[in-house]
């Protein structure tokens, strides 16, 4: 049903659909080492919280490939270093740390007892594959729950890219959109351009056009007018990290949309796997927000459009307070954005 393949592992190499080039080119970026995967996450060759987790998992596999012929002690030291290094690639999406913890658990619980490091390599590949398969299954499950909040002929506003490109192949918020389209709800999507990286313009538009799902691309600042005119029935966004009290970090601009949604009484749902919930923090204030390069704001397609020597503030994410969120659509059901609902389940793999 969905032809987009953002990630695959073949012949000991990781291939990532290069999201810096879409929609102009569909090219794969090849990772041969854990440092290549670090680069791919940091430079956003691959992005989106669940996909970042999957890429990091294969980063650990590639580290094992690189170091497994060394003495065990060196191997352990190098693997520890690789995992720590990968954890520094991007700070906000908790799926990165969640996936690294899963991989580290397989590495640490087997390294002493396993007969050869070649066998450990196989175990790590299997765990990385599992993370990918589970993510896909999780996406389908979220879509099945999420489609229930989509009314016939709904006009849906979405932000950033939360589709196949942000996951291992179907999508979180855009997975719900896909599902609603497939089951014949006759929906229409408004796609926020999502400054400054333009994930909406470049990636979400590309995905929706490929699947012939009706959509209109808008500049970020247009959404308020659409809501005021009554043209938006539902807002669906993804998440990079969810605090146990229901606060949600997501792409910069999400918070503003949530305030508008409240103003105009529009349902505002977050769609995210439970691996995006961080049980180690207490609220949104504890979430580290990534600040990216000034050039993302001052330049367009590599050409400087702002004057030289100016100050720029470029946070990649913001935090939406739980009180602005109607519900959180996960693979275990639709949770309330509050402590009690979120406490009811535990992160997979922990
Ligand atoms: O900076 P990005 O492109 O990695 O940010 C992505 C988002 O904010 C998405 O909305 C979020 O990861 C959820 S997508 C499954």
Image (cartoon, rainbow, N blue to C red):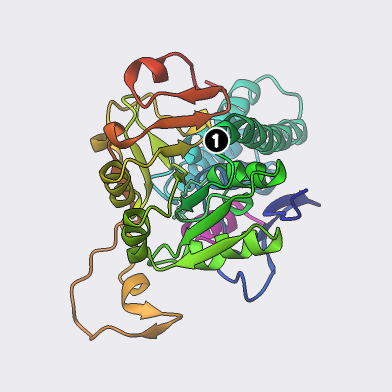
- Viewed as shown, does residue 197 lie left or right of 9? left
SS at badge 1: helix
Q: Is residue 305 above or below residue 24?
A: below
**Residue at the spot of label 1:** 99
**What residue appears at the point 28 percent right and 41 percent down from the top-left corner?**
262
Q: Position of residue 127 (x, y in %)?
A: 68, 32
**What residue appears at the point 64 percent right and 30 percent down from the top-left corner?**
141
- Viewed as shown, does residue 235 lie left or right of 333? left
Q: Nearer the viewer, residue 263 or 87?
A: 263
For the record, the magenta segment spans: 32-45
**What residue appears at the point 52 percent right and 34 percent down from the top-left corner?**
149
Q: Position of residue 227 (x, y in %)?
A: 35, 54
Q: Nearer the viewer, residue 142 or 282?
A: 142
Quadrant of the rendered structure where residue 54 is?
Answer: top right
Quadrant of the rendered structure where residue 152 is?
Answer: top right
Question: From the Cβ of disc 1, is ligand 1 less than 8 Å away?
Answer: no
Any magenta on residue 64? no
Q: Position of residue 163 (x, y in %)?
A: 59, 50
Overall secondary structure of the magenta section: helix
Q: Nearer the viewer, residue 11 or 196?
A: 196
- Point out the residue furthest to the right here: 11
**What residue appears at the point 66 percent right and 42 percent down from the top-left corner?**
179
Q: Position of residue 292 (x, y in %)?
A: 34, 61
Whether residue 67 is visible to the viewer of this picture, yes or no, is no
């Amino acid at each position: 049903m969905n032809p987009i393949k953002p990630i695959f592992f073949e012949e000991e190499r990781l291939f990532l659909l290069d999201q810096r080039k879409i929609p102009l080119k569909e090219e794969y970026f090849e990772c041969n080492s854990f440092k290549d995967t670090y680069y791919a996450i940091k430079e956003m060759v691959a992005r989106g919280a669940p996909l970042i987790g999957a890429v990091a998992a294969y980063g650990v596999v590639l580290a094992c490939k690189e170091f497994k012929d060394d003495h065990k002690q060196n191997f352990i030291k190098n693997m520890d270093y690789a995992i720590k290094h990968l954890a520094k690639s991007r700070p906000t999406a908790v799926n990165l740390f969640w996936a690294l913890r899963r991989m580290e658990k397989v590495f640490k619980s087997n390294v002493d007892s396993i007969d050869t490091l070649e066998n450990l390599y196989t175990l790590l590949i299997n765990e990385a594959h599992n993370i990918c398969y589970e993510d896909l299954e999780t996406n389908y499950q979220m879509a099945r729950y999420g489609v229930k909040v989509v009314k016939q002929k709904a006009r849906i506003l979405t932000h950033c890219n939360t589709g196949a490109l942000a996951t291992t192949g179907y999508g979180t918020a855009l997975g719900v959109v896909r599902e609603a389209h497939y089951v014949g709800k006759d929906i229409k999507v408004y796609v926020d351009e999502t400054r400054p990286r333009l994930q909406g313009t470049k990636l979400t538009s590309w995905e929706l056009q490929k699947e012939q799902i009706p959509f209109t691309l808008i500049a970020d600042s247009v959404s308020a007018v659409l809501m005021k005119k009554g043209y938006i029935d539902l807002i669906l966004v993804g998440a990079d990290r969810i605090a146990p009290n229901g606060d949600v970090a997501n792409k910069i601009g999400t918070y503003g949309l949530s305030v508008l949604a409240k103003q105009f009484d529009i349902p505002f749902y977050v769609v995210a796997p439970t691996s995006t919930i961080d049980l180690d923090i207490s609220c949104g204030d504890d979430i580290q927000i990534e600040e990216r390069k000034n050039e993302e704001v001052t330049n367009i397609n590599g050409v400087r459009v702002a004057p030289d020597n100016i100050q720029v503030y470029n946070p990649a994410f913001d935090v939406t307070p739980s009180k602005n969120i109607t519900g959180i659509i996960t693979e275990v059901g639709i949770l309330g954005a509050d402590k009690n609902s979120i406490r009811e389940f535990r992160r997979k793999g922990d």
